Amino acid sequence: MTALEIKCLIALGKTFDYNFQNTAKQAYFCKTSCFLMIKLRLVILESGAHMNVNERIKDQLENNPVVLYMKGTPDFPQCGFSGQTVQVLNACGAKFMHVNIFEDPELREALKVYSNWPTYPQLYVGGELVGGCDIVTDLYQKGELKTMLSAVGGVEV
Ligand SMILES: N[C@@H](CCC(=O)N[C@@H](CS)C(=O)NCC(=O)O)C(=O)O
């Protein structure tokens, strides 16, 4: 159980003591708070907040065949290099997960160490770093990018 969950339990416990006059109300509140705790746990699990940053990176790369770490989102890239990489991936019909590094400053720094690559975007195919915008564009122009993506099931059919 995480510190956040423990804090929530304590907060809920205090509300319990304060509010409850009768058992019917208590039973109702108990049911609702159990439901909320389950939901909270699911949100924590889904968000990856229970993992440290390197575990989060590994989890993303193990569970998604094509991952683009970028500035902004595919619909709203916030850097020309990231925008160009998205265009190249779209031109190949790629299915990819994106991570907006502006939303996770800790990951932004940790991934540079993990990959030994100092800039964004960073494209991973089959868990392996392919490279940034220049390399990805070059592979596209040589007709090799789509083959790499197809090999891991990363192209729309
Ligand atoms: N030549 C690089 C260009 C990418 C680049 O220079 N990115 C810079 C500016 S967007 C960067 O990520 N700097 C580190 C940072 O912002 O954390 C490529 O092919 O991807």
Image (spheres, rainbow, N blue to C red):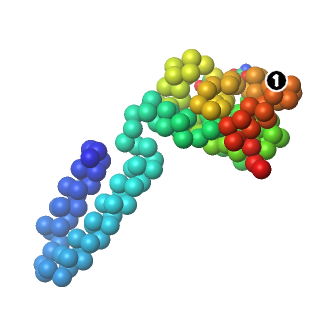
Q: Is residue 113 visible?
A: yes
Q: Is residue 71 visible?
A: no
Task: Give the residue type that dot 1 points to.
Answer: Asp
Q: Quadrant of ligand 1?
A: top right
Q: Position of residue 21 (x, y in %)?
A: 12, 78
- On screen, residue 60 versus residue 66, left or right, reads left
Q: Which residue is mark 1?
A: 138
Which of the pair 149/35 is nearer the observer?
149
Which of the 4 image quadrants contains residue 142?
top right
Residue in the picture at 70% in, 45% down: 95
Q: Position of residue 152 (x, y in %)?
A: 67, 37
Residue in the picture at 63% in, 43% down: 97
- On screen, residue 144 versus residue 32, left or right, reads right
- On screen, residue 8 versus residue 20, left or right, reads right
User: Would you place residue 111 above or below residue 6 in this image?
Assistant: above
| Residue at the extreme top | 116
Residue in the picture at 61% in, 26% down: 128
Q: Secondary structure at mark 1?
A: helix
Q: Position of residue 45 (x, y in %)?
A: 40, 49
Which of the 4 image quadrants contains residue 67?
top right
Which of the 4 image quadrants contains residue 41?
bottom left
Q: Residues within 10 Å of mark 1 (few under 14, many from 20)?
A: few
